[in-house]
Structures are given as C-alpha cells and as structure tokens.
Image (tube, rainbow, N blue to C red):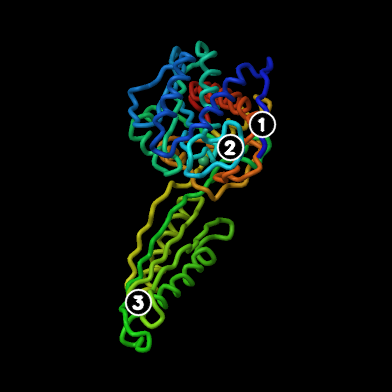
Amino acid sequence: MADQPLHTETAAEPGFGQWVKIRRHLHQYPELSGEEVETTAYIRARLEELGIRIADAFKLRTGLVAEVGGLRPGPVIAIRADIDALPVTEDTGLPYASAIPGSMHACGHDFHTAALIGTAHALKLREQELSGTVRLIFQPAEEKAKGAQQVVGSGALEGVAAIFGMHNKPDLPVGTIGIKEGPLMAAADGFVVQVRGKGTHAAVPEAGLDPIVAASHIVTALQSIVSRNVGSLQSAVVSVTKFNSGTIWNVVPELAVLEGTIRTFEEGVRRRVLDRFRQVVEGTAASFGTEAELRFIEGPPPVHNDAALAALGTQAAREAGYTAIVPVPSPAGEDFAVYQRHVPGLFVFMGTNGTEEWHHPGFNLDEAALPVSIAFFSRLAELALEQLAKGGEGL
Ligand code: NI
C-alpha cells in the first residue's frame, strides 16, 4: 500500500501531526507480545511530556497505566489500547516501515496506542471540568491473549465503572465507527485430541485398535455439532486443521493426533459446544475401543458489549460529527473480553480505510482516523463520566 501523506495541521485538527509522528515511530520500532520494553518507555516519555501522570501503583512488566482527571470527585472509567506487534515481516515499502526484522505492527496496535496518547492529551486539556477519573491502560501482549489478564492482576480495573476500547477496521471508511451491543468478536478456543489405539501389522488389523479409523470418525462426527447443537440464529465454527498419524504403509500406528479451533460468540453457546465436543470425542473413540485424551487451549471469551454503553457510544459518535453503524461481528478473538468479565465495557471498530486485512505483511491504515478516534473517545469519556455521576441511569 502506498504511503499516506503526512497530514498538515489545521485549526480543526490541532496537534494532529504529533500523533502521526508518534504512530510512525511506534510503527518503525515494533516489539512482540511481552517484550514491549522500548515501547513502554516511549509511551511513558510522551505522556510525561504532556503532563499526564503515570499510575505506577499498577505494576506491569511491560505496558503501563496513566490517569487524567480526579480534580473533581466522580467515577473512574478506563480506556484501553493494546501496544504489541506481530512476528510478521513487513512488506509495505513505507518510509517508516519496521526497522526490526520479523516484527511488524501488522494489526495496527501502533495506531491504537497513538490514538490513546492523543485522547489522554485532549482530556488533559479539559481536566478541570472532568467529574471523575479516566484511567488510560496501555496493555501489553494482546496477540498472545495474556496482557488483559496481567492488567487485571495489577489491580488497574479496581474501582472502574466502565471500560472502552477499539480495533481499527480496514473495511470501514475513516469517519465511520462500528458500534454494536451484544456479541462483537469471537471466543477463540483451541484443541488437541490424542487418539490412542493399539499398533499392529497392517495385514492383521484384528490384532490391534486402529486410531486412524477412530480419529476419522471423530472428525466426521464433530461436523454435527454446528449443524445439530447450535441454533439457526446463533453461530459457531469447529475446524479440525491438523491430522497426524502413522509412519509407513504396512503398520497400523498406535496414535492419531487432531488439532484445530472452535469459535463462538456467546458464552452459553461456547459452553454447549465445548461440552458436546468432549462427548463426541470421548464417545466416538470409545466406540472403536480406542482412548481419546482431549486438551482445550482456552482463548479469550467473546467480546460482548453492554447495551447502555453502546447507546452512549453511538451518541458520542454523533456528537463528534461521525457516522455510527452496526458492524458485522468478527470471528477473530480479542482479549478486551477479559475486562468485560469484570466490568461493563464497549469495544468498537474504528474505520481506517485499509486495503489489507489484519495481520497481512502489507497492512496499513489511513492516519486521518487518528483525530476521529481522539475526538470520539474524549467525547465518550466525558459522556460516560457525566452519566455515571448522575447515578448511571441505564449504565
Ligand atoms: Ni489486533
């Protein structure tokens, strides 16, 4: 994708150039999940320059928490940005392309981080008027679905009444914000199934227990879960993506191993699919005299937005002069969902007009979405504090 021109500052977009500069610096020096040491130092330096206090009481190895407000009493709300990059080799040709081989901000978390620093600045300018506190969470390790849990462990969610976050969305235009109550992104669980049989000579199968035949029936039986156990208006995906067994043409092996992923959008459906998965695997294996050992690799739960916060988000978008639409949910996972297990939250899709999908080596976004994000989140934070201070009717 071609380079985006550096937008010149206008009266309507004060300081826009500085957020672009920050985003490009982060883009050029990406760090992988859990290794965001320089990134954290860079964010800290920028926040300190802007006079924003760092909340060091919340201890994180990488990532940090900062705060704006608190001059007047009121509730605490949080806005979260993820800061980590992916093990992807960049292929954009941008002048500020990754300087670190094998590491790239291919999911736009550089954009999320720059937008949150800009939002912190916008709120800082209005700090005298804020009734309450806005906690700014710069979260590490989203791509490994570990960072949100670390932030919760640091205590940074304590006392928080509502939390907000976003992901850039390449297929939405700049100025359009996808806001939806209920399910938005999927729970992404993995599985490994080991089917253990009894090896034998391929010409004497009756002397053994064939794990390939048993595992083949398991793969087929698993297809019934989505078609027979998930409602027609609900959705789920069960994909077996790996099937390993055997060494040579004349030996029935001892073991067959299956791996794959399960995606669901609601906790109830997730539980039902996982329970059914276990029954099908164990029951089918037993019916062939084999034994199955099943291990789930638990991913983040589904992103599920609070209805009242979604309405507030739509109001904030409108008041900031942007278009709110109800987006199609994404089957990708997102560990923002971990926060929503603790406090009501709203996660939105920010239109960034990209040509490539998330995680592509040519991924890029339109930086004109930076002032949109900053205006939207600062308005949303003000509205949320006002509503919560009034007793949070509907929140
Ligand atoms: Ni991402």
Residue at the disc numbered 3? 253
Q: Name the residue under label 1.
A: 4
From mark 1 to mark 3, how far is it between C-alphas?
56 Å
Specify the amino acid type for callout 3: Pro
Point out residue 92 in the picture as x, y percentages from the top left corner: 61, 40
Q: Residue at x 63, y 43 (%)?
A: 327
Q: Earlier in the sequence, mark 2 or mark 3?
A: 2
Q: Between residues 204 and 306, which one lies in front from this camera angle?
A: 204
The quadrant in which residue 308 appears is top right
Query: In which quadrant of the rendered view does residue 278 lie?
Result: bottom left
Residue under pointer 2: 168
- Kindly check if marks 1 and 3 are in contact, taking CB atoms under 8 A apart as contact: no
State whether residue 306 is above or below residue 156.
below
Residue at point 38% right, 67% down? 257
Q: Residues within 10 Å of mark 3 (few under 14, many from 20)?
A: many
Q: Residue 105 carries which label?
A: none
Q: Which residue is pictured at 62% across the width and 32% down the height?
A: 314
Q: Earlier in the sequence, mark 1 or mark 3?
A: 1
- At label 2, counting other C-alpha atoms closer than 10 Å, the crowd grade (few under 14, some 14-19, many 20 or more) is many
Q: Position of residue 168 (x, y in %)?
A: 58, 37
User: In the figure, residue 174 lies in which quadrant?
Assistant: top right
Q: Is mark 2 within 8 Å of ligand 1?
A: yes
